[in-house]
Amino acid sequence: MPLLPSPRRPSGPSLTAGRDLPAWPLYLMFAGFPLFWVAGLGTFVPILMALLLGPLMVVRRGIRVPTGFGWWALFVAWACVAALQLDGAPRLIGYGVRMSNYVGATVLFVYVHNIGRRRLPLHRGLALLAAFFAVVVAGGWLGVLAPTGRLSTPLATLLPERIAANAYVDALVRPAFAEVQHPYGSPTVFYRPSAPFPYTNGWGCNAALLVPCVLAALAAARGRVAVRPRRAARRRSSQAGRGGRAAGGRWLPWALVGLLAAALGPALATLNRGLYLAIAVGIGYAAVRLAVRGRLATLAAVGVCAGAGLAVGVLSGAAAALQARLEYSQSSTDRLSVYAEALQGTLASPLLGNGAPRPSATLDVSVGTQGQIWNVMYSYGFPGLIFFVGWFGWLVWTTRRWRTTADLWLHVCLVVAAMTIAYYGYDGMQLSVLMAAAGLATREVRAR
């Protein structure tokens, strides 16, 4: 008697494995980030969570990755080979920190891409990123209200004095609430919020990535508020219980709008040009995509909010303060000089790069620390750069089609990331936020 053909297995992520993966580690990572920060472990969250997420995936079968993940896998593998170029313990430590971020981001992406939609629906994943944005905004206000403050963590007391005295280590385990800058010749001291990250650019990069995610969460929340009453009407047997949840869920869109409004204060205080450029490009790009689809009401709302933010920036004096800082700061000229050094250093070792940044010959900075693509190019050579940029290009391309406004804003987050790698460093939580958003976006593409 012939055997019956076995049922065809689905081509997407394993449904059984995805449903079994728990969501609570992601809540711990993002919503629980303040716990790590006050302990002095904020910089090490990606690798600490990888040690938790990795075993959870190992004990389950059917973990899959999208085809384009090969770009990222090749990049991480090439970065491992580039370690042959390291020539000292200090550079080995810096290389190890960056590699731990890459490994942590890899595990996070695979985990989010495989977690089932029942355990972590899209609206909950977006709300989780919005919760982390609330942490970022709260840290920014801490820098605004107490700009000279500094957090003394338990890890700082445990480290040997010789290690804790290192300026970089001190910035990690005794984080300041704001960067204090006094450009030469300037009559003004600039206090730029940075908490809960060591540097202001870290705050700006996270904010640039998270604003589109919050807008995606807002779109998803508004859609759920509109849909729930119709579902309750179709299922009258449970109308009372579902109606209560629907009414209770109506506060979420207003809370997200309030969160975006609260972010204006610290965002303007950072005087971060990269943040403003990223938000402008992201909103402009979304406006074009909305206009093409004829979403005029959403387009008008985006335009009003953008105009209101610009007006607040001008009326609050932030625009004048930024102009004054640029008048005395040489940051643009210095960056161009460091970029030129990075290119020259890569041309001297084009295949494997230099393994890690090196001190600049002209400035008091390290070559390869003023933008992620420059870091990758200088540290891992041109092949590493091709793999790295290829990953970002694939993410943008594969998520370009959108069905809902939430899909569009999640795609905008990846577009913003592809642009800001030119001038922001993607270490620690910046890379984690990106990979979490990418995991959600690619999971939704596969589901569609």
Image (tube, rainbow, N blue to C red):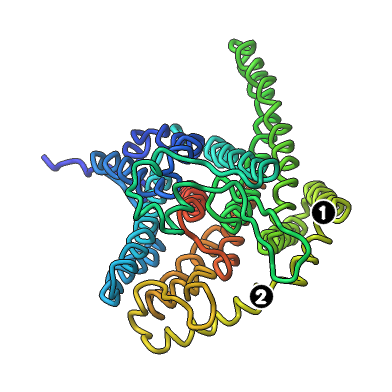
In-image side of 389 versus 77 (left or right): right
Answer yes or no: is residue 444 visible.
no
On-image quarter of the N terminus: top left
Where does the image place residue 170, in percent across and percent down from the top left?
A: 45, 52
- Looking at the rendered image, the disc whose residue lies closer to the viewer, 2 or 1, is 2
* Residue ranking furthest to the left: 1
Compared with 145, 366 (above or below) is below
Query: Does the CB distance between marks 2 and 1 fall below 8 Å?
Result: no
Q: Residue at x 65, y 72 (%)?
A: 331
Where does the image place residue 422, in percent across and percent down from the top left?
A: 57, 71
Dot 2 corresponds to which residue? 332
Where does the image place residue 94, in percent across and percent down from the top left?
A: 37, 63
Dot 1 corresponds to which residue? 313
Crowding around mark 1 (Cα neighbors within 10 Å: few <14, some 14 to 19, many 20+) is some
Crowding around mark 2 (Cα neighbors within 10 Å: few <14, some 14 to 19, many 20+) is few
Q: Residue at x 62, y 55 (%)?
A: 179
Compared with 389, 255 (above or below) is above
CA–CA distance between discs 2 and 1?
A: 22 Å
Where does the image place residue 393, in percent across and percent down from the top left?
A: 51, 68
Q: Quadrant of residue 423?
A: bottom right
The disc, 2 or 1, on the residue closer to the chain's N-terminal end is 1
Q: Amino acid at mark 2?
A: Ser
In-image side of 385 versus 255 (left or right): left
What secondary structure is marked by label 2? Answer: helix
Of 21 and 259, which appears nearest the observer? 259
Q: How many numbered marks are there?
A: 2
Q: Amino acid at mark 1?
A: Gly
